[in-house]
């Protein structure tokens, strides 16, 4: 054993020997309380990281609060101080810095469990406590007498408790409907009141009004038990809510999947490939077909603004409206006019972009119209060129009297038509550069020798490789691709 270890052991033995039996028991009780608090704090932090998908920070604030209190409790013990070669003044300043800052995680914890009415008051209280903590630490750095600092803290604590009490009393008697306190908050208040009795006793000791031992840690242990219940209850309750939401989203995803075509139409002389890649469980992209006969079919691609459940619900409405357009499937302008009238007035904060393509294989003719949608791309086998075709009117669902026009396009054997949503061209890489229509056209020019099914898979892989969707970066928008090969 080294000389330093021998010295420390001897000093500790001398310190313990100087204690009376009652004092030694008191020191051991404080150490046991500090160890218990540290264990509880570490368990709370571990539980947060184990259940962190809930995103509830009460466990972190609770753990930090317990750690600070436990360290302050140890720093006040003569037996613990004797383990380190530091002056009494050093330990007094350590205790003071913790005393200044410990109220902050406590206030943040309370902010998490309180209702919105109480949160407005707590914001101001947290600001005041933060200002006091900053000035208190600066005062300690300039070596202000700790006795004066602790006196200021006692006054500040009493002022805080009086402010909270007055606010709660005023809230009880305020006009308007009264909300019943949640179970969590009632448990919190019960533990807090018990602790406050011990805190008042400790501050009266600090002000020399009373004499005796500071037993605040006993009340704090009761309070910690209540905080632990609140933290664990919130964490598991949040997780149950997340599981319920995940289950509902999974059901919504299945329902939305059922609204999409389960297969593509089979027409002699036409190969169709479709891919739908949502950014979340449910999305706002949509595509569907209106088969007329073995030579003619209508194709719709649409994109609802926004994401998630609201966009998916509007997409479901769009499917119902599109099914009613069969009578004039040959006229894209009438199809979009009918969809617009069906959707107008059904929602306020969303709109729909759409592209409708009618394919007539007997005449080798396409009729096309769009509503605020990206242009389709047509690759010609004969010339090897790719051209954009745009025939846009207003977005669907905004203006009841919006008018649409269509354009006719002649196609030849070997031509390829690409319909897509803006999630393809607007996919961004780490440098925030978009994939863009130029890259899409280039890919269409250089991959004309593969089948439609292989083409859509290859294009999706190219977009994912460009934007990093297949690795660390999340997909930023829904993606839908339809490829039509004229054979």
Image (cartoon, rainbow, N blue to C red):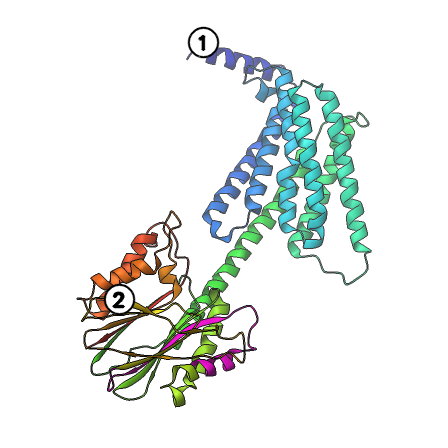
In this view, the residue farthest toward the front is: 383
The image position of residue 128, as x and y in percent, is: 71, 37
The image position of residue 257, as x and y in percent, is: 38, 73
Position of residue 297 in the picture relative to residue 252 (left or right): left
Q: Is residue 104 above or below residue 358?
A: above
Q: Which residue is mark 2?
A: 386
The image position of residue 311, as x and y in percent, is: 48, 69
Pick whichever of labels 2 and 1 is earlier in the sequence: 1
Q: Quadrant of the C terminus?
A: bottom left
How many numbered marks have been drawn onto this rendered protein structure? Answer: 2
Q: Quadrant of residue 175?
A: bottom right
Q: Which residue is mark 1?
A: 3
Labels 2, 1: front one:
2
Position of residue 63 in the picture relative to residue 166 (left or right): left
The residue at 31%/59% (across/down) is 438
What's the mark number on residue 435?
Answer: none
Q: Is residue 379 above or below residue 169?
A: below
Q: Is residue 301 above or below residue 474?
A: below
In this view, the residue farthest toward the top is: 3
Is residue 171 one of those drawn in magenta?
A: no
Q: Quadrant of residue 332?
A: bottom left
Q: Which is nearer the eye, 442 or 346? A: 442
The residue at 47%/11% (across/down) is 4
Q: Is residue 24 visible?
A: no
Q: Circle 1 sits in a helix, a strand or a loop, which is it? A: helix
The residue at 79%/55% (across/down) is 172
Q: Quadrant of the N terminus?
A: top left
Q: Is residue 177 above or below residue 168?
A: below
Q: Is residue 306 visible?
A: yes
Cα–Cα gap, marks 2 and 1: 85 Å
| Residue span colored magenta | 336-364
């Amino acid at each position: 054993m080294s000389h330093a270890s021998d010295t420390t052991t001897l000093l500790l033995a001398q310190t313990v020997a100087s204690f009376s039996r009652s004092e030694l028991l008191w020191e051991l009780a404080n150490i046991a309380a500090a160890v218990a608090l540290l264990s509880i704090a570490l368990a709370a932090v571990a539980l947060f990281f184990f259940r962190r998908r809930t995103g509830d920070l009460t466990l972190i604030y609770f753990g930090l609060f317990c750690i600070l209190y436990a360290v302050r409790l140890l720093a006040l013990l003569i037996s613990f101080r004797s383990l380190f070669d530091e002056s009494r003044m050093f330990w007094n300043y350590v205790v003071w810095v913790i005393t200044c800052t410990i109220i902050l995680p406590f206030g943040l914890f309370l902010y998490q469990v309180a209702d919105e009415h109480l949160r407005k008051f707590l914001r101001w209280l947290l600001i005041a406590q933060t200002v006091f903590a900053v000035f208190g630490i600066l005062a300690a750095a300039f070596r202000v007498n700790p006795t004066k600092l602790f006196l200021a803290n006692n006054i500040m604590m009493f002022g805080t408790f009086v402010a909270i009490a007055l606010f709660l009393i005023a809230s009880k008697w305020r006009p308007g409907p009264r909300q019943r306190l949640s179970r969590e908050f009632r448990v919190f208040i019960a533990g807090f009141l018990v602790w406050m009795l011990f805190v008042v006793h400790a501050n009266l000791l600090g002000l020399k009004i009373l004499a005796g031992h500071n037993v605040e840690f006993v009340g704090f242990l009761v309070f910690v038990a209540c905080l632990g219940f609140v933290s664990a209850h919130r964490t598991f309750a949040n997780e149950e809510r997340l599981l319920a939401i995940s289950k509902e989203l999974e059901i919504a995803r299945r329902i939305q999947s059922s609204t999409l075509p389960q297969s593509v139409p089979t027409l002699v002389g036409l190969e169709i490939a479709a891919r739908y890649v949502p950014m979340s469980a449910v999305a706002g992209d949509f595509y569907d077909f209106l088969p007329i006969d073995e030579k003619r079919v209508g194709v719709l691609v649409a994109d609802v603004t926004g994401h998630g459940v609201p966009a998916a619900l509007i997409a479901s409405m769009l499917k119902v409206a599109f099914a009613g357009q069969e009578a004039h499937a040959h006229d894209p302008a009438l199809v979009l006019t009918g969809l617009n009238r069906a959707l107008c007035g059904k929602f306020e904060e969303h709109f729909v972009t759409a592209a409708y393509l009618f394919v007539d294989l007997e005449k080798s003719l396409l009729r096309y119209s769009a509503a605020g949608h990206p242009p389709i791309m047509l690759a010609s086998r004969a010339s090897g060129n790719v051209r954009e075709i745009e025939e846009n009117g207003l977005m669907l669902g905004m203006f009841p009297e919006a008018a649409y026009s269509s354009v006719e396009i002649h196609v030849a054997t070997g031509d390829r038509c690409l319909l897509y949503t803006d999630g393809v061209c607007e996919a961004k890489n780490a440098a925030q550069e978009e994939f863009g229509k130029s890259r899409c056209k280039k890919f269409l020019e250089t991959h004309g020798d593969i089948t439609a099914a292989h083409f859509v898979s290859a294009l999706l892989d190219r977009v994912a490789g460009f934007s990093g969707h297949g690795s660390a970066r999340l997909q930023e928008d829904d993606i839908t691709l339809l490829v039509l090969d004229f054979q």
